[in-house]
Image: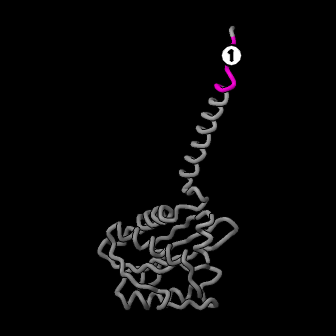
Amino acid sequence: MSMVRVGRWTRLILIALLSTALLSGCQQIRTNLGLGSSGDSNVGREVERSMRRMMRAAPSLERDHVLIVTSFANVDALGRSSRLGRMLGQHSAASITRRGFNVVEILLSDTLYIDPKQGEFLLTRDVARLASRYEADAVVVGTYTVAHDIVYVTSKLVRSSDALVLAADNFELSIGPNMRRLLH
């Protein structure tokens, strides 16, 4: 068997090509995991998937029903909002609207105060009051919890007449530099 002699430059070119192919594969894996180049999750895509799952899980909800979508609250600071919480609410409203549901636009940050000592009880009561005011059939509420490098998000579709949870979904967001800015 004869050996093919490969010159130094040929070896360097082969190594460069293989390295490029390997790095491209790693980038594809990052993209498939929903991570951007900065290590942040693609918030819009994750919210879109979550809302699709949640709305599919609530077959009793009709397209002509009116919905309210709230800003998502940090479980550890229910009385305060963050850019992430407001953005999660806005992305959720946009996703639900694209699915053909009627969404009433309200800015809850000035209208709704949640007492940290009473948590979801007060949230449910105030949302029911707001839903009545806007004649909404259901409300999308959400919370998030910040861990070391992940934000855990929960969203719920709540019937306004009796606070029954019609559907719920969870997802995770990786924390990179952009996400850190949204959390403050």
- Residue 128: x and y in percent read 44, 88
**Is residue 144 magenta-colored?**
no
- State which quarter of the image contains the N terminus: top right
Question: How many other residues sit within 10 Å of disc 1, few (<14), some (14-19) or many (≥20)?
Answer: few
Q: Residue at x 43, y 78 (%)?
A: 69
Q: Residue at x 68, y 70 (%)?
A: 147
- State which quarter of the image contains the C terminus: bottom right
Is 165 or 76 nearer to us in this picture? 76
Q: At numbered mark 1, what does the secondary structure look like: helix, strand or loop?
A: loop
Q: Is residue 117 left or right of residue 28?
A: right
**Is residue 5 magenta-colored?**
yes
- Residue 26: x and y in percent read 60, 45
Residue 154, above or below 17: below
Q: Residue at x 60, y 72 (%)?
A: 181
Please give the range of residues in magenta: 3-10
Query: Mark 1 sits on what residue?
Result: 5
**What main secondary structure does the magenta stretch of the protein show?**
loop
| Residue type at the position of mark 1 | Arg
- Residue 158: x and y in percent read 46, 78
Residue sitting farthest toward the front:
9
Q: Residue at x 52, y 61 (%)?
A: 42
- The color scheme shown is one colour
Q: Is residue 19 left or right of residue 166?
A: right
Q: Is residue 130 left or right of residue 36?
A: left
